[in-house]
Amino acid sequence: MHMHEFLSDAPFIAGIALSTLVVFIASKLWRSSSMVDKLPGPPSSSWLYGNMLQLVFPRIYGEFEFDWQKKYGTVYRIKGVFGENLLIVSDPTAIQHIMNNHSFIRAPIQWRKGELIFGRRSVYCAEGDNHKRIRAALSPGFAPTVVRGFVPIFIDAVTRIVREWEKACSVPGPQGAVNVCHLLDHATLDVISEAALGLPLNTVAEPSHPLARTHLHVLKSGFDRSKSDLLSDTFLPYIPTFLSRALLRAPTGPLKALAGFRSVTDDMSAKIIGSTKHQNEVEDSGKDVLSILIQGLAAQSKKALTPEELAEQIRVILLAGQDTSADALAWCLYELAKDPNYQTQLRSEIELYHSRSVSAGGPMEYDTMPLLNAFLKEILRFYPAGPYLERVAAEDLMIPLSSEVTMTSGKRISQLQVRKGQYVAVAIASFQRLESLWGADAGRFRASRWLEGDPCGGNALGPYAHLMTFSGGYRVCAGWRFALLEMQVFLAELVRHFSFALPEDDVVRPLYAGVLVPITKGEVKGLPLLIERV
Ligand code: HEM
């Protein structure tokens, strides 16, 4: 999910931030002490930023966080901006409790950004009964049978990549590295647009289509983050709503990108609402996710769905569903390029299943392919798109723990009391590297662990493979089945047609910029790989 730093227009923000400083300082001074203050944790590295620069701007994702987990355990505190105590949790029992409890809600900063990016009636911002209502209407569109019907759309989209890379491979002379992210981004956008929104697009052929331009521009804003964003994030929740909405009219950078994206998605929504396909013929139309959602919402309420409300859900589906899948696929190609043996074995498995499907005249049996699925599970474990999820306690709450924690006073506790307003980071990436759960080599990428039985000893969290990558509880990713099948189809087709190798000067590393993306030595998103036709 892309909670990018749209608010990095520092001078503009600074003006507004100053006017709310007094409210902010007052709220900080009134903070009462809590058990979280007495948890162990790293020393603060800055009075202003606390440990936030280490958490948010490391050289490589987890550089500090994974060491903190080893040193301080699965429940510890770090210092936030202005010395606030933030709770970091990778304890499985605590995670399960937090994700299932409706009193752990989105942090105010997330909510405010969600309002600006998607809209306040979006599934992203909705809480309580309203959230349940939208999710109930959304779920049938992601049912297994519906999702299986999207396979031809997935195949079409990945075939566009295959054709383009075939062209690149057929140019005579030495081949340079290809940035695989570029076409993965476009093809996955085509998939979302057609399968989820019912609007067929070919942005692989037409990369400057307004949706592609504005959507990718919004995502790119996530990379241009700076320290000042941490400060603006701290102040934003204290700024009156009318002022934060006015930000959307700011004429520069990320805000302009967001305004463009909102306007394109508003137009899409108006067209969809206006089209008979989605209003009256939903029963007969191709079942895209949005048609089913509209039908579900209409059945719940006598009031007609407004284009504005629909646009808010469209923005969530686009931003939640495109680069999460594209970047997971990029990490697949990266790890395959690093492991030629696994790549060869996987290709043989794909060939076998492909020829079986051709003889049977049906689709490939993706779910039964051992090497393909072991590999995808390891990618999802090792490269979770959202390495941590932010929540805030809506009231004073108790969090149960799997094992006792020793406080700085020496006292041992088996449950942690948190005060209303306590910030909690559910540390998914850390959880998925816990040696006590995943084994001594949890910090290493090794797909074969999934072929050796259950690698995490049956501690079921999350909807798939005990992983929290698709989150869990009441806000579990709505599109996880969709994403999984899309990745299975894309990976099988790409590996069937091409081999992948690392260029000699590979220095790609994972960084969190809205999602966990590959960053090149030029400090931009990208993954240059050597590609050959097989
Ligand atoms: C590898 C791919 C994907 C990953 C790792 C992923 C991960 C996640 C995570 C972690 C959340 C929870 C965010 C939070 O609570 O703050 C989420 C929510 C969501 N995802 Fe996904 N996602 C993926 C693909 C998709 C796709 C393809 C779609 C739709 C076509 C989708 C639709 C959604 C929606 C609508 C939500 C909001 C749910 C809510 O707030 O109730 N996701 N996803």
Image (tube, helix red, strand yellow):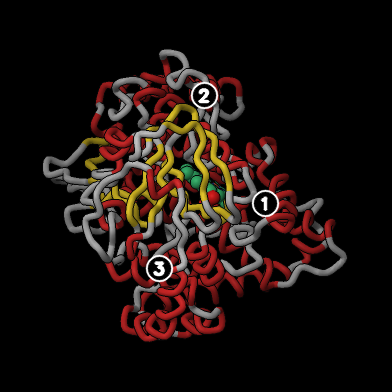
Instruction: Identify the image quadrant of residue 6.
Output: bottom left
User: Disc 2 residue type?
Assistant: Asn
Q: Earlier in the sequence, mark 3 or mark 2?
A: 3
Q: Residue at x 28, y 40 (%)?
A: 68
Image quarter of the C terminus? top left
Q: Are marks 1 and 2 in contact (CB under 8 Å)?
A: no
Q: Residue at x 35, y 73 (%)?
A: 8
Asked whether mark 1 lies closer than 8 Å to ligand 1, one says no
Marks 1/3: CA–CA distance: 36 Å
Label 1 sits on residue: 288
Please state which of residues 246 and 282 is positioned toward the viewer in this rendering. Answer: 246
Label 3 sits on residue: 233
User: Of the numbered discs in the image, which one, if any, rests on residue 459?
Assistant: 2
Residue 11 percent location from the top left of the image: 31, 83
Q: Secondary structure at mark 3?
A: helix
Residue 246 percent location from the top left of the image: 50, 84
Q: Earlier in the sequence, mark 1 or mark 2?
A: 1
Q: Residue at x 44, y 29 (%)?
A: 404
In the displayed structure, would residue 363 be above or below residue 391? above
Asked whether the viewer can see residue 466, the reply is yes
User: Disc 1 residue type?
Assistant: Asp
In front: label 1 or label 3 = 3
Q: Is residue 497 left or right of residue 370?
A: left
